[in-house]
Image (cartoon, grey):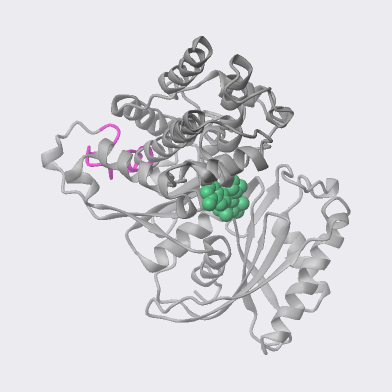
Amino acid sequence: RKKWKRVVGVLKELEESCETTVGRLRQVVDAMAVEMHAGLASEGGSKLKMLLTFVDNLPSGSEKGIFYALDLGGTNFRVLRVELGGQRSNVDPDVEQQPIPEQLMTGRSEDLFDFIASTLHRFVEKGNDSVQYSITKELGFTFSFPVKQTSVSSGVLIKWTKAFAIKDMVGKEVAGALQQALARKGLNMRVAVLVNDTVGTLALGHYHDADTVAAVIIGTGTNACYWERTDAIIKCQGLLTTSGGMVVNMEWGNFWSSHLPRTSYDIDLDAESPNPNDQGFEKMISGMYLGDIVRRVILRMSEESDIFGPVSSRLYVPFALRTPAMAAMHEDDSPELTEVARILQDVLDIPDVPLKARKLVVKICDVVTRRAARLAAAGIVGILKKIGRDGSGGIAGGRSRSDIKMRRTAVAVEGSLYTQYTMFREYLHEALHEILGEDIVRHVVINVTEDGSGTGAALLAASHSSSG
Ligand code: ADP
């Protein structure tokens, strides 16, 4: 009995340290808006990098013609072709996916880009477009690694992440390397835009809904970008665009604030990660980490009691519990929680867990996911606040709510956490309602886009094509 009491104590402590009251969320909203401001004011002014993208117009739906895109960011790389007919016609891209051979991820940059160009060459021919067309085709390049952008179609690789480590590429111009490989293959194509995946999502969102002002991805990692007025981008004095605005890539996974509700599990996870003190927001929100937070709580309970039997050695394995398995336990609606029992047994090697303890596991998943979804919601409202679309009249505004006529405002969202994890999505919506209030939230629309990282890049190639 005493042991059970201890386990309940662990849960209670978890709940308290994960608390996200509306008051707390509003503090996170304010902190996000303030940090955005700081990141725009000076280089290195905030943990939010607020990277310029030079994307100064978004697809409107009137684009016409055939456009291509390359999407490089994970182990698979994709080639896409879209044919646009104007009038917001449906975008139904032809897509081909190719795994990148492992030796190319760590070899010479020329070999990687030759491989990419060859794949594109074959893809173009298969689509019955002539490779030697007389008119240059426009290509969008989604390159989801940290890049210091110098124009909409050029940028320098800051560092590789994930499985890539091509030394001679760091510090080099990314689109230029691709452009040269295209020339070697005799492809008459121009790299019209070099973008990050969230920018693609914003572009696709805007193509379908012109009120779209921001895009958020919540998948393995998390990031967001939004449309900003150039005169608010203080760190780039004299920046002029025809539209008066530009997309800013926030790199919001690195957001940090003392108002974020942090637990001892978060601190341990961060300390044991390859990038301590980095990506603090991401480590509380995204699919890479949620399962591991839950694993750490179960481990602690198992160590403090015998309700999970002898401590399973699997519980010590980092990332042994993946977020999809965690979600499956969370959403197990069988009266006996049979799915929870199965996953505890199969994944964590913990057999015969009594129902009472299985319920506890569901509760842990609920606490961790609820906090994640509510913080993501606060982040979204932070963006809306920064651009004066939260109904409060902007960060410096002193006007009262009733003075403001709230405009319809759309946010494009992508990523499995939002699209596949129902509880996450519902908690996010609930928090939006709580923070903004019914009067304002009525005007805020969340649109799910599909495959914006690739398709959006093709659309941006269209809206930034040299023919205008
Ligand atoms: P990306 O890797 O490009 O972000 P996704 O948006 O599909 O791709 O995100 C994948 C991540 O989402 C995985 O790391 C996994 O943690 C999580 N995930 C996938 N399916 C589910 C699910 N049904 N429930 C919860 N999380 C999921």
Q: Is residue 394 a member of the stretch shown in magenta? A: yes
The magenta-colored residue range is 382-396
Residue 314 x, y percent position in the rendering: 72, 32
Q: In the picture shown, does residue 450 fall above or below 37?
A: below
Q: Is residue 130 left or right of residue 452?
A: right
Q: Nearer the viewer, residue 287 or 444?
A: 287
Q: Is residue 444 left or right of residue 31?
A: left
Q: In the picture shown, does residue 306 fall above or below 295?
A: above
Q: Is residue 285 a member of the stretch shown in magenta? A: no
Residue drawn at the location 59% of the way across and 14% of the way down = 304
Q: Is residue 22 left or right of residue 288?
A: left
Residue 258 visible in this rendered orientation of the protein: yes
Residue 196 visible in this rendered orientation of the protein: no
Residue drawn at the location 64% of the way across and 24% of the way down = 309
Q: In the picture shown, does residue 92 fall above or below 213?
A: below
Number of dots carrying numbers: 0
Residue 301 x, y percent position in the rendering: 57, 20
Residue most extreme to the top:
2
Query: Quadrant location of residue 23?
Result: top left
* Magenta residues, dominant SS class: loop
Residue 340 x, y percent position in the rendering: 54, 41
Query: Quadrant location of residue 158?
Result: top right
Residue most extreme to the left:
402
Q: In the picture shown, does residue 377 fall above or below 86?
A: above
Residue drawn at the location 66% of the way across and 22% of the way down = 271
Residue 108 x, y percent position in the rendering: 88, 55
Residue drawn at the location 63% of the way across and 17% of the way down = 303
